Image: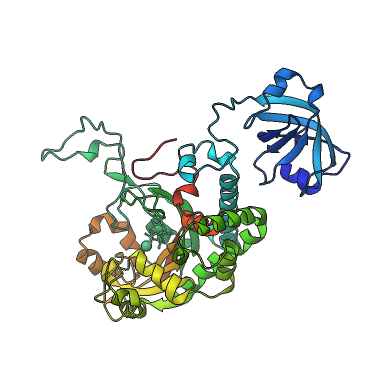
Amino acid sequence: MKAVKIKNVLQTGAVNTPCSVQGWVRTFRANRFIALNDGSTIDNLQCVVDFERLEESLLKQITTSAALHLEGTLVESQGSGQKVELQVEKITLLGASDPEKYPIQPKKHSLEFLREKAHLRVRTTTFSSVMRVRSALAFAVHEFFQEEGFFYVNTPIITGSDAEGAGEMFHVSTLDPKNPPLTESGDIDYKSDFFGKETNLTVSGQLEAEAYALGLGDVYTFGPTFRAENSNTTRHLAEFWMIEPEMAFYDLNDNMDLAEKFITSVLKKVLSRCEKDLLFLEERFNNEEKSKPQLERSPMGLLEKIRFVVENDFKRVSYTEAYEILRNSKPNKKKKFQFPITEWGVDLQSEHERYLVEKHFNCPVILYDYPANIKAFYMRRNDDEKTVRAMDILFPGIGEIVGGSQREERLEVLEKRIEEMGIDKKELWWYLDLRRFGSVPHSGFGLGFERLVQFTTGMNNIRDVIPFPRTPQNASF
Ligand code: 4AD
Ligand code: MG
């Protein structure tokens, strides 16, 4: 008999029909009740075996994490919660598992412990829920942009230009690190490297996406990006996934409107599609919050938080307004900020972002018109000559979730900026070409996918929302 997914059995399985399933044993109680999970849903299928009819040797192999194929008849469930359970008639052991050695026991393990077992942690309820929600979010992202008429473009992962001027990139090279060819002046001779030049893993697909927007109109990327910054925080990964829409003929307001509509749309879809997983994650989140000091606890439950974002407009505030609020804030006056707000132009730290979002406005905030000197070279300069048309979206508990801007479409202004910032103009020849041939106002933003998954699942550490996290000193698996 062909096995079916447990999700379908629980949704539509009819009493007195034959049924076959396969999955992993979560628990085996009283030599009689197998809770089987196949990953299709958070729920286990209760399977009842008649142990008197089982061979002793097979019985011994029904252990937590063993893989089984079960055949039998669906009967009305005696237990609570489920309509049906499987009365097992035939058991096939697909893969045995040694319960003494299997590291994940049917008890609560810490997330830190499970991070060391990243290859097995997806068999826990928490991680399987997070990963189902992650998948649903990714699908909703594509759905949103496709429905809005955007084209999905794939920008290169290996790049020859340091797009953001970030200078924190991973080198890509096939040269022998012990014995690289050198130029006459003693530098590494990248001419003899694989690409004939120095190359890196990309920090963003934006510049290439701009080229495509100025031909296809509205495009988006959704791919991995890499940053070699040594930030050991709960919100930074060295390898993360970013969604970068780029739109021709959009100004900054259009950009903010789209970003807000995009985020609320995907959250709404996941609320209705991942109800069971989210209810479980909410319970987990609430328990976690209880262990925090009163003042640091989230004022809302997980689902309430998501609904709040879906139902309320984001607050739009200019950098200058935010600066005034922060300068006059209690923590600033009482010198409680680690980085005091003293003069206009300072970059905002996460303590400031959190104050604005979690204490002052109590809702998602879009900050715009930042000082030029703390933002990238490609952002459009305002007439005041001091600020640029940048926007960051700040979320409760997460901080910055989106960074974007209207792009500088005026060739002379852009060239001047590139020179001022000491960036090599030659490397950007093709990017400048975009301003030479049919340049138009355009805008875009980048949303850190894992930060969105963090917000939606309530997981505190970004390492727990990506299957195999890459962070400083850690690239296991
Ligand atoms: O603000 P960022 O650096 O913006 C850009 O890269 C632009 N090129 C985007 C654009 O306009 N097309 O990064 C965008 C977002 C951040 O807001 C954050 O959510 C996420 O990417 N992000 C990270 N997420 C996880 N780990 C890291 N190390 C991240 N760095 C940025
Ligand atoms: Mg940013």
Q: Indicate left or right for 72 with 341 as reference.
A: right
Q: Residue furthest right?
A: 16
Height in image: 299 above or below 461? below
Q: Is residue 335 visible?
A: yes
Height in image: 110 above or below 350? above
Query: Quadrant of the rendered structure where residue 327 is?
Result: bottom left
Residue drawn at 60 percent across, 49 percent down: 129
Residue drawn at 26 percent across, 43 percent down: 197
**Residue 251 percent location from the top left of the image:** 43, 74
Residue drawn at 44 percent across, 71 percent down: 357
**Quadrant housing the N terminus:** top right
Height in image: 52 above or below 166? above
Q: Indicate left or right for 222 with 180 as reference.
A: right
**Residue 86 percent location from the top left of the image:** 80, 37
Picture quarter with ligand 2: bottom left
Q: Is residue 154 visible?
A: no
Q: How many numbered tags mark residues here? A: 0
**Quadrant housing the C terminus:** top left
Query: Quadrant of the rendered structure where residue 266 is?
Result: bottom right
